[in-house]
Each structure stands twice: as structure tokens, then as C-alpha cells.
Image (spheres, grey):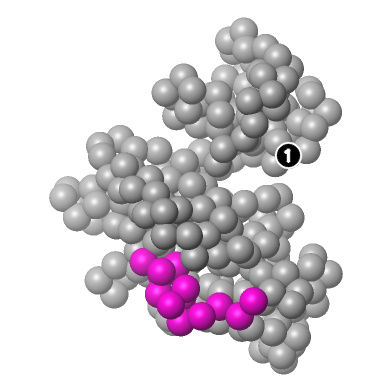
Amino acid sequence: MDAEKLAGTFVRLADTLVEDFDVHDLLQTLAARCVDLFGVGAAGLLLADEHGRLQVVVSSNDRTRLLELFQVQNDEGPCLDCFRTGSPVRVDDLSTAQQRWPGFVAHAVTEGVGSVVALPMRLRGQTIGALNLFGGPGSARFTDHQLAIAQALADVATIAIVQERLARNRDLLATQLQVALNSRIAIEQAKGALATLLQIGLDEAFHLLRAHARSNRRHLVEVARDVVERRGDIDWAELRRTDRRAGRAD
């Protein structure tokens, strides 16, 4: 594992431990950095809403989001087990888990998933969600050392989410998580609108939204609402051309 990348990831996550941080951007950063650090095919995060039900909040690509939704909608999969037990779930060869999660395994294999690691997002005995890491067929086995590092990253993100609740009251956690879930709806709508406008994929549309938000020091959800409500005069086509010339960063 690249030590410099790992250190940079912890620094990036620590930078969010400030007032009024962007929850969605934090979690998207965590997913993207996990894919890069551990060489997995994709990553996703699910958080519990105010009623304790898991909701898909972030995924590194749209196919992963559909796989996460399958788990929630069918009440079956490693993320559900991880959330309920508060313990990591690691399956190095997904084909061996057909009896455990028959529907999920069949669906995951068709999407090119060969292994999975699910890590709880927990603090002081309370589990608020889970981080999923999906490996491709024949991907390298997750080591105990990698598992410990991935759990540490999930723990940092968890601390960032619940820090204000610890300082104020127990109700703030549910409010913060609900804000993240509401933000996701606006962002998904904006992704669809941009993808249609520019005739591009959903993943590229999200990258453009995020790049514009960061370069203008705005919250991602604010930019997304501008797109949905057709506010502002952003030349998205020109921004896309500029972005492609400059190259991408997560």
C-alpha cells in the first residue's frame, strides 16, 4: 500500500472535522480513496435514517449504487449483516456465499463482483452505517492489515458525522443523516439532468458537479439544486472540455 496516499487520505478526512462540513463530500471522498488505496473495483456507503433503516448514500459508480440498493430492497447481503452485528464481514470468494445470500450473490456475480468486505461505521457501540468494498473476479485477498486500515478510515468518517451530536444532543445525528439522504436525492436528479444535457454517463456528470462545487467553494448539494432548478449561467459543456484537458482528480 502507498504510505503517502494513505497519509493523504487521513489528512483529507481530518480536514472535514470542522463546523458545517459537507457530509456527502466526505463520504464520497472516503469511497473514492478506498478504491484507490485497496485496489478494489468499487466502494459504497449506507447510513441508517432516523427510523434505523439503511439507505444508500454514496457509491463510487452507478452500478455499485444499484448493487447496494438490491441489498436494501431485498433485505439480504453482507452490508445488512455487517450493520446488524456491528462486525466486519469478509468474503474472499463470493461464490462460496450462495447459501448465505442467494439473491445478492447471483446479482453481484453478474455485475463482475468476486469478493466483498463490509465494515461497520460505529462509535461507542452505536452502528450508524456500513462501508462496502467490492473486488473483481480473482482479486487479491484482503489482508488483516488492510482490513484494519479500512476500518480506521470508516471510523474517522463516523467520528466526523457524529461529532456535533456528542456536543449538542442525541437528536442531531438523525438530522445530520437525514440531510445527507436528502442531499443525495438532489444530487441524483442533477446527475440525470447533466447526463441528458451533455449526453454523458452518470459518473462523469457527477464528477463535473463535484469539480464545480469544489472550485467555487460551494456545497455539492447547492450546485445540484441550481442545476435541477436551472439557476445560474454555468457553461457545463465548456467546463467539461476544460476538465478533460486538465485531467481528473478525486
User: Dividing the picture into quarters, in which one does residue 87 lie?
Assistant: bottom left
Q: Residue at x 31, y 42 (%)?
A: 15
Q: How many labels does the image show?
A: 1
Q: Residue furthest top?
A: 233
- Residue 65: percent from the left, percent from the top? 66, 55
Q: Is residue 241 left or right of residue 10?
A: right
Q: What's the magenta region?
A: 140-152
Q: Name the residue under label 1.
A: 202
Q: Is residue 102 above or below residue 107?
A: below
- Residue 38: percent from the left, percent from the top? 55, 65
Local crowd size for mark 1, using a 10 Å CA cut-off: few (<14), some (14–19), many (≥20):
some
Q: Which residue is drawn at 83% across and 28% down?
A: 199
Closer to the camera in the image, 249 or 42: 249
Q: Is residue 116 above or below residue 194?
A: below
Q: Is residue 175 left or right of residue 170?
A: right
Residue 143, magenta (yes or no) = yes
Closer to the camera in the image, 3 or 74: 3
Type of the residue with mark 1: Leu
Closer to the camera in the image, 211 or 193: 211
Residue 131, magenta (yes or no) = no
Q: Which residue is drawn at 62% across and 35% down?
A: 248
> Which is the main secondary structure of the residues drawn in magenta?
helix
